[in-house]
Amino acid sequence: MKPIGPIIKKYIEERKMVKGEVAKKVGITYNYLSTIFQKDTLDAAMLERLCVATGLHPMTFFECGKEGETVSYSDIKAKANIGNAEVKIHHNSTDYDRALADKERIIEEKNRLIEEKDKLLLEKDKRIEEKNRLIEEKERTIQILMRQLRLQDGTDSRQDN
């Protein structure tokens, strides 16, 4: 185990933390914090309070793992930033899998509805085209019939010339 006091002191000073504020967060006096800086060991409860107040991970004091190995300290940092709130990250795979399956079903249903809407719009467009074609055909038929009617009455403009 590494000497605790000097590591805490170095950590606080490197981050330019105010020692009085750290002591207040831990619930000790400034003088007692200065005494801790000289100690090689510390009880676990005090170490935890110091780690929470500073954001320093407790594993820092133990000689385990490989040199240069990166460790995630997000759990302690979250607790340090939030205060006394407890942060729990929990993954219940059954609930997660069920929620994921529900979302996938919803997405599939939405995609099916979009495809159905696209088909209906295409059918609608085809019907509109057919109606327009029928209207044009009826207009041509009307024009032909009106021309024939004028021919029968002798009022065709071509005959007047």
Image (tube, helix red, strand yellow):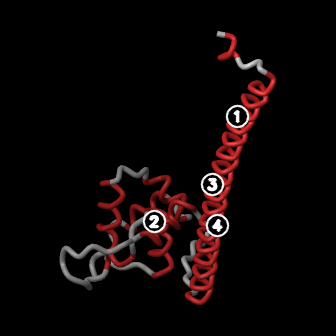
Marks 2/3: CA–CA distance: 63 Å
The residue at the point 56 percent across, 81 percent down is 90
Q: Which residue is mark 1?
A: 144
Three-letter code, disc 2: Lys
Q: Left or right: 119 with respect to 16?
A: right
Crowding around mark 2 (Cα neighbors within 10 Å: few <14, some 14 to 19, many 20+) is some
Marks 2/1: CA–CA distance: 88 Å
Three-letter code, disc 3: Lys
Q: Which residue is mark 2?
A: 77
Marks 2/4: CA–CA distance: 50 Å
Q: Nearer the viewer, residue 36 or 55?
A: 55
Which of the two discs, 1 and 4, labels the residue nearer the N terminus?
4
Marks 3/1: CA–CA distance: 27 Å
Q: Nearer the viewer, residue 117 or 132?
A: 132
Where residue 68 sits in the image (x, y, percent)?
19, 73
Which of the two discs, 2 and 3, labels the residue nearer the N terminus?
2
Badge nearest the viewer, 2 or 3 = 3
Residue 116: mark:
4
Where residue 109 sits in the image (x, y, percent)?
64, 73
Which of the two discs, 2 and 4, labels the residue nearer the N terminus?
2
Badge nearest the viewer, 2 or 1 = 1
Badge nearest the viewer, 3 or 1 = 1
Crowding around mark 4 (Cα neighbors within 10 Å: few <14, some 14 to 19, many 20+) is few
Badge 1 element: helix
Quarter of the image holding residue 147? top right
Crowding around mark 1 (Cα neighbors within 10 Å: few <14, some 14 to 19, many 20+) is few
Residue 126: mark:
3
Q: Left or right: 142 with respect to 2?
A: right
Are circles 2 and 4 on residues that touch, CB within 8 Å?
Answer: no
Are circles 2 and 3 on residues that touch, CB within 8 Å?
Answer: no
